[in-house]
Image (tube, grey):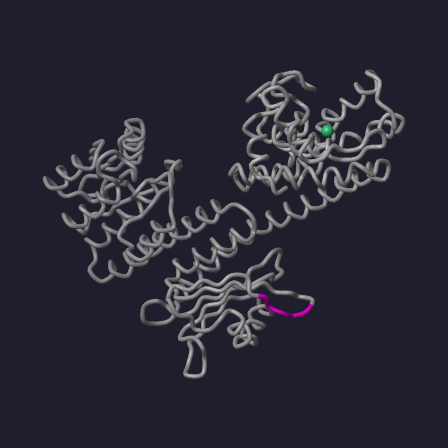
Amino acid sequence: MDSQADINQKPILVVDDDYSIRALIVDALNDAGYGETRDVDNGLDAIALLREASYDLVISDLKMPGMSGLELLSRIKEIDPSTSVIIMTGFPSVDLSVSAMKDGAFDFITKPFKIDDLIYKVNIHLRGKKLLSEDELNIQIEHTRLHEKSRELSTIGYIYESVEKTQGDNKQIFREIVDLALRVANAESAVMVLYDEDKGLFHLKIEQHEKTYKLASGDQLIAALNSLLEDVVSTRRGVIQSGNSRTVFRSLLCVPLMIREKVFGLLILMNKRSEGTFTLRELNYIENLTARASLNIENQLLYESLFLSIMDTLKSLVHSIHVRDHYTERHSHNVTRIALKIADSMGLTAHEIETLRIASILHDIGKIAIPDSVLLKPDKLSTQEYDIIKTHSSVGESILKSIALFETERKIIRHHHERWDGRGYPNGLSKEGIPLLSRILSVADTFDAMTSDRPYRKGLTRSVAFQELLKNKESQFDARIVDAFIAMQNI
Ligand SMILES: [Fe+2]
């Protein structure tokens, strides 16, 4: 490597409120042979230094008490626009990456970073400057090339980071991808369609429009663009097209969404918000984005299909109990319905409600291990038989133990017969020590058991069952849940 010292003429300034990070960077710059470096722990001191002398490069943290890295950046651009800036951030955001791309005036590095990656970026920036001062003709070309390369690296890096952070179900992932694409390409409209290979049809998945009016609805667009979309599917390559008076768009960019070389959908962007058409660079960004996103979608699809097939197996286990005991299946159905209503009225999150739904469906799955002589006994159970019945909650948990997906659900199932006063089973947990969802399941389970007819007794009426719940508030049940349940009334 060239000696770095002759590359930078002016010092480098490092700004970070964390001393250890500043020291790490300064050491690395020294080791790499860069000249003078200064470091300060806040934006105001940095500005004072920048007013006194000129710096080639400022490496600044984004989040600092007082002045943020972005505020500092805009001040630096006022003081000396030729100063390069690298912003270090633990929280990359789409906004940041989009402004980086548009502005191109600064670069990013995401924490935690490898110090070599930072030195690489420093090198790119300072090399650009060195060329700028050496050769009038070459510099512009070389500088622009380096600058654009680094800008590109940083934008693509940010696309990866942003896609990486998209979580949730496919719909949410799709929505975030569309949103990201819209901003990265500065487009007016973005439409995602899924491709049904068997029928050769496109189905609108998501459409998003920046303008208050739409060019056409997503479905109309699919019809108008059908042959172009078919081309992209068959070539599996992204395209840019300019419109004319007969087309619904002025400019269009379309890329395939693929899993293992198979096209499962398309992302279509229409019309730049500014003048002009989409560029090859934007096509490249969007291709990078969709390639990365496809990986996420593939994982999600795999997860969902695995989840569904496991769920099917478990439901068939529940069904096999039902074949022996007709009560169980209807019971798990009712318990699920009641538990979800309670959870909803208590304002639980969608995630908690989904967990509760699975736990409710499967809560008595452990009964599969209970012999017919006990499970189907028409008379009252002996203590010994009751003890056998009581094993079903821990057996249920162990059935789900081998399935990592049901980590939370199995705990809920294990504890659905615990009591508020600690006299339940299998662990004798009490009060808030019992998982909240188990406490909800317990109220729903008991209510349905009380109101159902069994071979050895007739079910209680709903109002008598409500009285029973109220009577056992604070002993068997969490009073808050009983109250929420009774307040609903319309179950
Ligand atoms: Fe149970």
Query: Is 275 located above or below residue 488 in the figure?
Result: below
Residue located 10% across and 39% down the image: 52
Query: Is 457 located above or below residue 311 in the figure?
Result: above
Magenta stretch contains residue 386: no
* Viewer-side residue, 479 vs 333: 479
Would you identify the image quadrant in which residue 378 lies? Answer: top right
Task: Return the residue found at the far left.
Answer: 52
Q: In which quarter of the image is the C terminus?
A: top right
Read off the magenta span: 199-203
Q: Position of residue 266 (x, y in %)?
A: 54, 64
| Left or right, residue 32 beside residue 442 | left
* Viewer-side residue, 267 vs 82: 267
Q: In which quarter of the image is the N terminus?
A: top left
Residue located 63% across and 45% down the image: 303
* Viewer-side residue, 177 vs 465: 465
Q: In which quarter of the image is ligand 1?
A: top right
Would you identify the image quadrant in which residue 488 lies? Answer: top right
Q: Where is residue 459 in the image (x, y as percent from the top left)?
A: 77, 33
Would you identify the image quadrant in which residue 432 lies? Answer: top right
How many numbered marks does the figure carry?
0
| Left or right, residue 240 beside residue 341 | left
| Left or right, residue 468 beside residue 217 | right
Q: Where is residue 133 in the image (x, y as percent from the top left)?
A: 19, 53
Query: Is 371 located above or below residue 88 in the figure?
Result: above
Q: Mostly what secondary structure, the magenta segment?
A: strand
